[in-house]
Image (cartoon, rainbow, N blue to C red):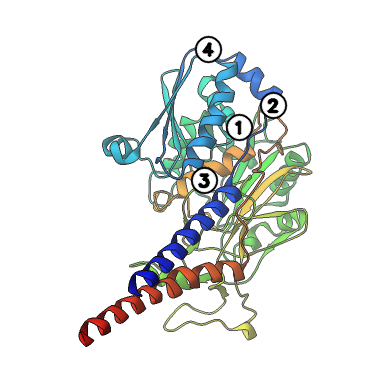
Amino acid sequence: MKYYLFFVLSSITAALTLWISLIHEQSLTLTEPKTLSANTIAKLNNMPGKITIQSFSMPQPIIVREYVENLIKQFQQHKKDIEFRFINPDLAPDLVRKHNIHSNGELLIRAQHKTRKLSLIRENTLIDLLYNMHSKKKDLIGFISGHGEHSPYDKGVDGYSTLYVALKKINVLAISLNLDAVKDIPKNTHAIVISSPKQPYSDKEIATIKRYLQAGGRLLWLTEPNNNAYLSKLSEFLKISTHPGIIIDLTSQQYRNASPTFSFISQYPNPDIVSTKTMSIFPKSAALSYQLEWLPILKTNDKTWTETQDITGDIEFNPEQNEQQGPLTIGIAQSTPFQAIVVGDGDFIANRYIGNSDNLSLGLNLFQWLLPKQDAPAEQLIKPEHQLNLSETRIAGIAITLFIIVPFGFLLIGLLIWVRRRHH
């Protein structure tokens, strides 16, 4: 009897494991187009020199290796001197530490005496990175100054000097731009950054920014809680606003010494615009309100709210104080009539916090989406054919079966065996 029960439960467990793995594999399969885009092929044909690509991939799940290998093979069809191989991270811990590898499948690419990493692996992200490694031309980013903004040259804890160095590595040059000193933003400025000003902008400066955007410019605006008053006319122009208060995230209690104002972001509603392999952390965030032309790109979890009172002692959600319950949007993007990204926190890429979790990768993703794609349309994105979309009921059923029914069954077998032995 005991062997029969053990056989039945083992069979059920094996069947469930196989079923879930099949669902996972079918649902997560990423299929690149059968042929690369004309833009990608043209760039590959004009790239001189050998390219070496290593993928730090675990043997399982095999779907990761298959996806990466299929994409690289398509690139090799048009550039024969691309060398590619897999590295098992478990067998090369020194290389993992040396190159700071964080995610399964991450690519380490060498070309033109440069070394770069890529974790968001798609046709457009890979070709853009390869193109930048071969290009001698630098994209120019203007960081607006004169109002207490974060500076790319500031090496202090609130400065952006770490970001400045990281941008240089991908052929992006950050410069300081004083709007009072220019009539118009120079045409060779590929994008402008407004990073947490502490003083209001003049009407002339707002008009200069609006002219730049209306002419097809690109904007990254990093704001702060209760900070939009300094740029109210720009907010009206963009049709956005911030909710009063600062976001409180209860999941911060899981982390030692984490402030309740830290927002832990792992939800990226539009990953083709921006995403990371792991979590990103925002020290003090504002929740954004926006019109339909904007897409949410960063969202908090449902254990968050906008706190409008002083953050002292015990704090709790109070809807009577006009506080908003999560999930809350702290990042938005639009591609027409011009490209723009707005994020409700400017500190997450400051020197003090840019090393937290995946903040650096997220910051670079924001810039890479904004920058011109070298004759490729900005909205050209490679999307997966399938995604893992299980209903909450289905997830709950799987969890109950695996973590309650099956363990209880084995416990029951143990009890039956123990009882039978006592009787004997």
Q: Secondary structure at mark 1?
A: helix
Disc 4 residue crowd, few under 14, some 14–19, many 20+, Cα 10 Å: few
Single out the mark in the foreground, 1 or 4: 1
Foreground residue among 75 and 178: 75
Q: Which residue is mark 4?
A: 48
Circle 1/circle 4 CB separation < 8 Å: no
Circle 3/circle 2 CB separation < 8 Å: no
Q: Which residue is mark 3?
A: 363
Single out the mark in the foreground, 4 or 2: 2
Circle 3/circle 4 CB separation < 8 Å: no
Whichever of labels 1 and 2 marks the residue nearer the N terminus, that label is 2
Circle 1/circle 2 CB separation < 8 Å: yes
Q: Position of residue 21 (x, y in %)?
A: 51, 53
Disc 2 residue crowd, few under 14, some 14–19, many 20+, Cα 10 Å: few
Q: Dividing the picture into quarters, in which one does residue 208 lie?
A: top right
- Residue 217 shown left or right of residue 75 in the figure: right
Q: Which residue is mark 1?
A: 123
Disc 3 residue crowd, few under 14, some 14–19, many 20+, Cα 10 Å: many
